[in-house]
Each structure stands twice: as C-alpha cells, then as structure tokens.
Image (cartoon, grey):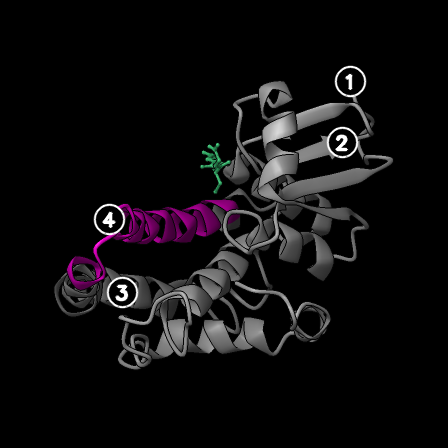
Amino acid sequence: MTATKPSSLKLTYFDTTGRAEAIRLALFVGGIEFEDERLNREQFAAIKPTLPFGQLPVLTVDGEHVIAQSDALLHYAGILSGTYPGNDDPFAALLVEQVLGQLADIAVKLIEVFEGSDPAAMAAACTKLATEVYPPMLAALDRVVAKYGGEYSVGDKISIADISLYHMFSLISGPAPEMPFMPADLLAPYPHITKVFHSVKSHPRVVEWQAKNAARKQ
Ligand SMILES: N[C@@H](CCC(=O)N[C@@H](CS)C(=O)NCC(=O)O)C(=O)O
C-alpha cells in the first residue's frame, strides 16, 4: 500500500473543467503538488481499456495506483490538502457531506438536461430548472449555509464542499458560456450561497489558479 503521503500524484482528465476541476482546485488550494495531465480524445481512447472503469478522471498515486471515481478523488484531495475536516471534527465532516450531497442532487438535474441535444428543448429544460426545480433546492441549501456557515459553508474554513459549490455555480450561473440558457442571476436570491461563492472566488490560491488557467476552455 501507499505511504500516508503520496510521493507523486498525477490527475488525468480531458482539457476541460468537468469532473476534475474541484479535485484540481482542492489540491492547488492546499499546496499539494500534482501533475495536471489533460488528454485529447485519441489519447483517452488509447488508455481507456486500462482504466479501472474505462472513464476519467483518474488519479495515479505514487506512479503505480490508478484510481477512479471523481467523488473518491475529491475526498482524497480534501484530506491531503486540509480542505476536509480532520478526524478530530466528525461533525464538521458531516456538515461538509451534507452540502456535497445537496450539490450532487443539483448536478444530477443538470446532467439530465444535457443528455438532450435539441437546443430548443435544452433551453426549455434550463428555464424549468431555473424557475421551478432549483429555487426550492437552492433556498434549502441557503438555509443550511445560513445555519452552519461563516465565511464558507461550514464555519470559516474552506472545504471541498465550498470548492465544489464554487465550481458548480461557475458553470451554471452567469455569465457561463456552457450554459447560455441559465439566468446569470441564478444565485441572486440566495445571499449565503452567494457569499460562499465569492469567498472561494477571492481565495488567493483560487485567484492564482484561475489566472494560470485563464486561457483554457470550460
Ligand atoms: N462516476 C464517474 C463518472 C466518470 C465519467 O462519466 N467520465 C466521463 C467524463 S466526465 C468519461 O470518461 N467519458 C468518456 C467515456 O465514458 O468513454 C466519476 O465521477 O468519476
């Protein structure tokens, strides 16, 4: 098995944010060195049969363990980088998981929309999300953050929940080139979520990461 701290990490994904960006950000925020490998479709096709589940992202730990599943990788990145509560604070971990769970429920709805290909149908589905489906989900998340949050969604320490929240709402609220049908002010009615979003956005390491990757596509 690997030692407690890995000797090397390589995160492999496509050259997009997608399911890798929160993992990249968690590692970067915590100052954990990693190789940020980005494959094109041909390179992916060549290694697909060798991957644990035939999909990306994967994290290569110590040059030998190729590990899949983005949620698992995000948690591992959180533990390594100090953006996941330690064993001494299980209740904080529970609260972080609660936020991550709600974000996952929000993401599932979006993925359903993007399974379609007809732009008019996608526009209608996005409008329904923004006006009917998301408001109660976001209002509930806002209440939870109001109760347990501070600068971030759980107290004043940045966690993988905040990084995921920031990444998700960077994608789905505007101006978001990937989501031309989503209203730019999706988060406006939710002050606590908005505050967390801006706390992450203005975190010095996040600012540094975004500047480094400004030329990349979403
Ligand atoms: N449950 C997996 C899903 C991974 C997944 O859907 N990966 C997509 C990219 S986001 C992929 O590799 N697609 C190419 C393929 O399946 O051939 C995770 O969260 O890591």
* Position of residue 9 in the picture relative to residue 12 (left or right): right
Q: CA distance from mark 2 to mark 3?
A: 36 Å
Earlier-in-chain disc, 1 versus 3:
1
Q: Quadrant of residue 184?
A: bottom left
Q: Which residue is mark 2?
A: 61
> Looking at the picture, which amino acid does disc 1 mark?
Met
* Disc 2 to disc 1, C-alpha distance: 10 Å
Label annotation for residue 116 = 4
Numbered label attached to residue 10: none
Q: Secondary structure at mark 3?
A: helix
Q: Is residue 209 visible?
A: yes
Disc 1 or 4, which lies upstream in sequence?
1
Residue stretch rendered in magenta on the structure: 93-122
Q: Main secondary structure of the magenta part?
A: helix
Q: Nearer the viewer, residue 27 or 176?
A: 176
Residue annotated with mark 1:
1
Alpha carbon of mark 1 to alpha carbon of mark 3: how far?
Answer: 41 Å
Q: Nearer the viewer, residue 36 or 149?
A: 36
**Image height check: is 128 above or below 8?**
below
Q: Which residue, given by chain and number where applicable, does mark 3 sit on?
A: 138
- Is 96 left, or right, of 49 in this rendering? left
